[in-house]
Each structure stands twice: as structure tokens, then as C-alpha cells.
Image (spheres, rainbow, N blue to C red):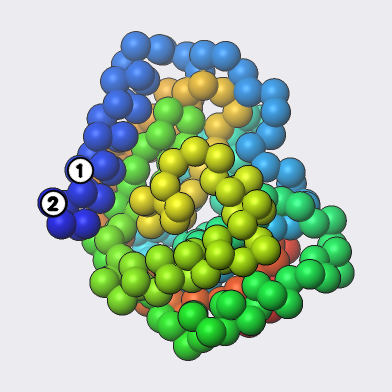
Amino acid sequence: MQLNERLHRAYDEVTQHSREQWDLHADGGKLITTPFYHPTRRALSSGNKPPLSENLLSFIAALNQAVQGDPLADVTPEQGVHFSFFPITRDLYERAEDAAERHDVQAIFTRHCADHVMHIRQLRLVALPNQILLAGIPDERSLQVRQTFAEALLASPWEAKIRARYPAGEIPQLFWHSTLMRYSAEFVSPAIREVFARFQHCDFGNVSLPVRLVLCNYNWQQVTYLA
């Protein structure tokens, strides 16, 4: 099975499963008291922020309207929407200065990713039980560059930090996505489900982004560009 078929099938399957779970649970289920990520601590990552299409702006506006007054909803701000290329570490750093050992990563990034532009096409919404993603299909060259970059990091002294970032699943991850909303319960609210259903089949276009090495918090509101 070619990757684009595998990705579309994975996106379809996880969305179908999520919607089935929503149908079985009219409310949000159990609350999640541990935050998905620390709000301000930073991680080493790679990726970039895209220009936002009209459809995406409309969807984010509808999400924000639907979650007004809901403390469980965390919608990514427009200026924080980003596509990760390869997230490298967990949120380990209080300040940029704390990542003093990052020079090895910068050298590996420069060797494998300098001047690379990632292309992600056929952008679409994907539902997790308590998250909404924007996901798409990468170009073949980006797949190769990301794989080589990940393998070089795993062969470096950074291996333990990489594996701590990915305790289960593939390295690098399968999905090519941007997380648009997180919900601190097992399942998103009925209002969010309605907005997802309204926009589920929208065409969100394509993006082409120079890959940057960054130190960032989880929603890219605090970003230091390293390469």
C-alpha cells in the first residue's frame, strides 16, 4: 500500500472510531486533570507556521465560538497554528538558554534539513476522541529527509531524549498534522462535534513550508528559531 493510501486510510479510521465514541458518549466523559503539555516549558522541534486559508480561518472562528465559556477547550490561536516536521524532545526547557546542549542537534539539522521545503497536500480535518487535527499527505522528498534526520538523531547522544518523546509508536510518527484543538476530557463537547461535522469534508488546500529548527512551547506561542 502506498503511503498516501495508508495515510488516508489511517485518517479515515481514526476519525470513524472517534465519531463512534462520540455517538456512544453524549457528554465529555471523564475529565483529564493532567495537562496535555506544560503551558510554557519548551521543546526542541522542527517545522514552521503556514499561512492560513479562508476555510481554516472559518473553522477556527467556528471552534472559538462553539467553546466560549468552556474551560476544557484549548483552541490553538491562529498565530500558533503550525506543522511539525519532526518533534525532537519533550517540553524539557524553562528558557531557551537552558537548551545549551542543542548545538549537536543544530549540526545534525543543518546537515540533513538545511533549505528543505516540506509540501503537505490534501489537507483535511481528522478527529481524535478529544482532539481535532488538520492533516495531509507529504511529498516523497520530505518523507526521505525526515527519516534521515530522525535516524541521525537516534544514532547520536540524543537517542534517549528522542525515545522519551516517542515512548510508543513509530519514529518518526505516521501522521503529518497540526493540532487545532485539545479538550481536557475523554471526548469533545457536543458543540465541538457539531462544528467538526460541518467542516469535516472541507478542502483545506496545501502548504509549502521551509523547515526550521525551533525551541517552542506546545502551541508555538513562544518560539525561538535556531536554524
Is residue 218 at all visible to an observer of this figure?
A: no
Element marked by disc 2: loop
Q: Amino acid at mark 2?
A: Met
Badge 1 vs badge 2, beta-carbon distance below 8 Å:
yes
Choose between 127 and 46: the one closer to the eye.
46
Please indicate whether residue 56 sits to the left or right of residue 17 in the image: right
Q: Position of residue 148 (x, y in %)?
A: 43, 71
In the rendered view, tell whether residue 36 sits above or below residue 82.
Answer: above
Report which residue position mark 2 lands on. 1
In the rendered view, tell whether residue 208 sits above or below residue 124.
Answer: below
Is residue 24 at all visible to an observer of this figure?
A: yes
Determine the residue located farthest toward the bottom in the rendered image: 115
Choose between 166 and 124: the one closer to the eye.
166
- The residue at the point 48 percent across, 88 percent down is 115
- The residue at the point 44 percent across, 56 percent down is 172
First along the sequence among labels 1 and 2: 2
Quadrant of the rendered image containing residue 94? bottom right
Q: Position of residue 95 (x, y in %)?
A: 84, 62
- The residue at the point 52 percent across, 69 percent down is 152
Mark 2 packing: few (<14 Cα in 10 Å), some, or many (20+)? few
Q: Position of residue 114 (x, y in %)?
A: 51, 86
Mark 1 packing: few (<14 Cα in 10 Å), some, or many (20+)? few
Q: Amino acid at mark 1?
A: Arg
Choose between 200 and 174: the one closer to the eye.
174
In the rendered view, tell whether residue 168 sits above or below residue 185.
Answer: below
| Disc 1 to disc 2, C-alpha distance | 10 Å
Determine the residue located farthest toward the left in the rendered image: 1
- Looking at the rendered structure, which numbered label has been put on residue 9? 1
Q: Position of residue 28 (x, y in %)?
A: 51, 18
Quadrant of the rendered image containing residue 9? top left
Count of picture labels = 2
